[in-house]
Image (cartoon, rainbow, N blue to C red):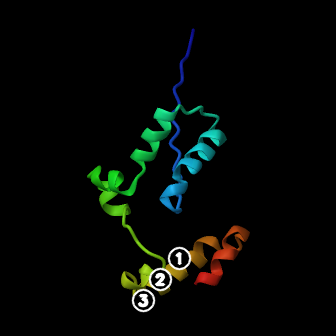
């Protein structure tokens, strides 16, 4: 008896950097994943992750999650009540987590 198992892995990477560094980041991620990229594949990946391309995809995820913000722009979208709720959720979920400590200065 032969059993075939197919595993699909989705990798989500969040990168905030100037667009001129995007090709370098794509190369770094590809190297980490052990994937060889041709120049055409690198260009296709860069085009696919441009903000406009993802926003124009028009799916529910892009409509909800993609917003071209700026540093400190949260002030235009979150009031004191929302920020307090965020802080409480952050503390409840990440209490005692050493990885969260550097983020606490932003609370």
Q: Percent from the top left, x then y, of residue 47?
A: 40, 46
At mark 1, the secondary structure is helix
Q: Percent from the top left, x then y, of residue 11?
A: 53, 45
Above or below residue 105? Residue 4 is above
Q: Which residue is mark 2?
A: 85
Q: Which residue is mark 1?
A: 89
Q: Determine whether, in the image, residue 56 is placed left or right of residue 71.
A: left
Give me the residue at 40% from left, 53% from top.
Answer: 50
Q: Which residue is mark 3?
A: 81
Q: Percent from the top left, x then y, of residue 37?
A: 55, 33
Of the two numbered discs 3 and 1 on the same chain, state the one appearing first in sequence: 3
At mark 2, the secondary structure is helix
Give me the residue at 30% from left, 60% from top.
Answer: 63
Give me the residue at 59% from left, 43% from top.
Answer: 27
Cβ atoms under marks 3 and 2 closer than 8 Å: yes
Q: Percent from the top left, x then y, of residue 8?
A: 50, 34
Q: Where is the C terminus found, in terms of image quarters?
A: bottom right
Identify which residue, 105 or 3, lies in the foreground.
105
Q: Determine whether, in the image, residue 60 is placed left or right of residue 78.
A: left
Q: Where is the N terminus found, in terms of image quarters?
A: top right
Above or below residue 56? Residue 9 is above
Above or below residue 45? Residue 18 is below
At mark 3, the secondary structure is helix
Cβ atoms under marks 2 and 1 closer than 8 Å: yes
Q: Residues within 10 Å of mark 2 (few under 14, many from 20)?
A: few
Q: Residues within 10 Å of mark 1 (few under 14, many from 20)?
A: few
Outermost residue on the bottom side: it is 80
Q: Quadrant of residue 98?
A: bottom right
Q: Determine whether, in the image, residue 64 is placed left or right of residue 95.
A: left
- As measured in the structure, the alpha-carbon distance from the residue carrying label 3 to the one carrying label 2 is 6 Å
């Amino acid at each position: 008896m032969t059993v075939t198992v197919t595993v699909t892995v989705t990798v989500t990477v969040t990168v905030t950097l100037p667009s001129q560094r995007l090709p370098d980041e794509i190369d770094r991620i590809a190297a980490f994943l052990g994937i060889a990229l041709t120049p055409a594949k690198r260009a296709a990946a860069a085009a696919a992750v441009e903000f406009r391309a993802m926003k124009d995809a028009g799916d529910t995820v892009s409509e909800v999650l993609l917003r071209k913000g700026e540093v400190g722009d949260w002030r235009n979208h979150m009031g004191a009540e929302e920020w307090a709720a965020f802080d409480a959720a952050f503390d409840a979920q990440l209490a005692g987590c050493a990885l969260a400590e550097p983020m606490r200065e932003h609370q």
